[in-house]
Image: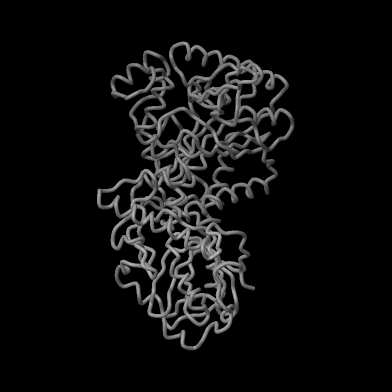
Amino acid sequence: MVDEGVTGPVEGAGGAGLRGVDGRGAEAGPPPAQGAAGSTEAVSGANGAAGREVPSGPDATGGTGEGARLQEVLRARRAKLEFWRQRGVDPFGRRYDVTHHAREIVDRFAELEGHPVRVAGRLMALRRHGRAAFADLQDASGRIQLLARVGPLAEDTYSAFLELDRGDWVGAEGTVIRTRRGEVSVEVTGFVLLGKSLYPLPEKWHGLQNVDLRYRQRYVDLIVNPQVLETFRLRSRIIREIRAFLDQRGFYEVETPVLHLIYGGAAARPFVTHHNALNLDLYLRIALELHLKRLIVGGMERVYEIGRVFRNEGISTRHNPEFTMLELYQAFSDYEGMMELTEQLVSHVAQAVHGSPVVHYQGQAIDFTPPWRRLSFAEALESMAGVRLEDVLTDDGARRVARERALELTRDPTPAAVLDELVDVYVQPRLVQPTFLYDYPVVLSPLARRIPDRPHLTYRFEAMVAGMEIANAFSELNDPDDQRQRFEEQLAARARGDEEAHQMDEDYIHALEIGLPATGGLGIGIDRLVMLLTDNPSIRDVILFPLMRPRD
C-alpha cells in the first residue's frame, strides 16, 4: 500500500545493482554547501553548518555571522513549506501505520530481508551519492538507513526526497536489504512527510554540548544525544521494576492529595498556593507520609505511592524543588524489616536493569548485594566527625559545636540543624558502599518511634550510597500522646525561627487515636536512585524538565 503524499512506484525494489552502493562512503568529510534544489541547506541535513554548530532554539545566540546564517536557514525551511504545499502535501502530516521499528529490522534482518516494511521517524542525515541518496531515520528504538534512488522512485519523487531536511519527520515504505558494506537498509519505494522541521537541530559533529541549553531544551537534547534518551528509558524501567517488586509482595498502589491544608512528613519549607473558590491557602505536599499512614489506620496494611513532592529549598546536583519519591508503609513491621526490604528492592532493581547487583557510578563500583553495612548514628558521628552525640543534644552544646567546627548553617544552630550539618559534612561523603545509618536522635525524627531504653534515640535509619542519602525509614511513631508532644516541640522550634519545623496536625493525631498498629515506613528518592543506576552525576540529568532560572 502506498500513502497519499510524495510516493513512487513500488516496482523495481531491491535490484542487484544496489549491492555495490553504500551511502556510508559519502560521510568522510563535511557535506556540500548546497542542496539539490539550490537551497541554502546542504543535502546532508547539516543546515549549511559544515563543521560548526547551529544555535538551537529561540533563546540561542551566536555571533553576527552565525545569526545571519541561521536566519538564512530559517528562510529556506519556510520556503520548503510552500514547496510541499504546492505538491498537494500537508507538511505536518497525518496518521501513518508503522509495521516495524529500526532496531527490529536490524535484529531480525535474516527473516525480513527482501520483505516490505513501513517505518517512521526523524531524519537525522541525508547524503547524496551519485544517483542515490542515503538517509538516517531515527525512531524510538534506534536508527535505520534509508536508500532512495531513481527506479524504485520516480524521478520527481526522488527529487522531492532530496528536499527533505535534517529534523523532518518522515514515513517510508520499502524493502529490507543489506548493502555491500553490510549496512542493513530500507530501499525506499514511497515516502510521506509527517512533520516539517522549521528550526535546525544542532550540527551532528558537535551535538548539543551547552549543559544549560540541554536542560532548557530537553526535547532537542533527547534527539541529538542518544545517551540521554537511554537514561530516561532506564528511568522508566527502574520505576516499572519497583512497582512490580512491591505488587508481588502484596502492596497496594494508592494516590494521596498533592494539595495539603497542613504540610508535614518532612523538615522542609513548602510552596504555598491559594484556592479561590474556598478562599483558602494550601500547600504543595512536602512528603507523602501522613496520608499513607492514615490508610494503614484504615486497614489497608501495605500501601505505596510513587509521586511528586515539592520543597521550597535550594537547587544543587542532588536537589530539585520538585522530585519523585517512593513511600511505602507496612503494618506489623519495623525499621529492621524496612532495612531488609530496602536491600532486596534496590538489589533487585539493579539486577533487573544491569544484570548484576554491582553497578558503576562515577568511577566507583557500588555493590548492592545484601546485607548492607550497618552503622549507628552515634558511632558514625564520633568516628568520622570527632563529636559525641550527647554534646550536641542541648542548645548550648549545639551552638558550641557549630562555633568550633565553623559550620555554615542556613538556620539557627539548634541541635537538629547542627546534627544535620555534621552528617552532611563529615559522615555522608565517606559512605560510598551501601550503608544503613541507624538509631537517629529524636530531635531529627519527630515521626519515628523512640527506643525505650534510650529515649533520646529513635528507630530510624537513612540509607547512604556514594556519599548521598537515597532512603529514609522508621519504626513509625504510633503513640498519639508522644506524637502530640513531638509536634508541640516542633512548634516551639518554629517559634525560635526554624522554618522547616513541623506544624501541628490534629487530624493525624486523631487517626493515631483510632489506632495505628506497629508499622514500618520507607521513603526512597527515585531521582537519586536513578542517578546511581544510570551513572549520572547530577539530579538534573535524570529529571526530564528540571527547574531553571528564567533567562533575562
In the displayed structure image, the side of residue 370 where residue 304 appears, left or right: right
Q: Residue furthest bottom?
A: 16
Tell me the quarter of the image containing the N terminus.
bottom right
Q: Quadrant of residue 304?
A: top right
Q: Residue furthest left?
A: 64
Q: Position of residue 27 (x, y in %)?
A: 34, 72
Residue drawn where x is 39% and y is 58% of the image: 76
User: Residue 292 in the image: x percent, y percent?
Assistant: 65, 31
Considering only vertical position in the picture, is 397 above or below 85?
Answer: above
Task: Say how many tags the image has.
Answer: 0
Indicate whether 112 appears above or below 16: above
> What residue is drawn where x is 62% and y is 47%?
243
**Residue closest to the eye, 63 or 113:** 63
In front here: 258 or 454? 258
Residue, far front: 86
- Quadrant where the C terminus sits is top left
Estimate the x, y position of residue 273 in percent, counting from the top left: 55, 23
x, y percent for residue 266: 52, 27
Quadrant of the image occupied by residue 423: top left
Q: In the image, what residue occupies the spot 47% across and 55% down?
A: 229
Observer-nearest of 292 and 125: 125
Which image quadrant for residue 174? bottom right
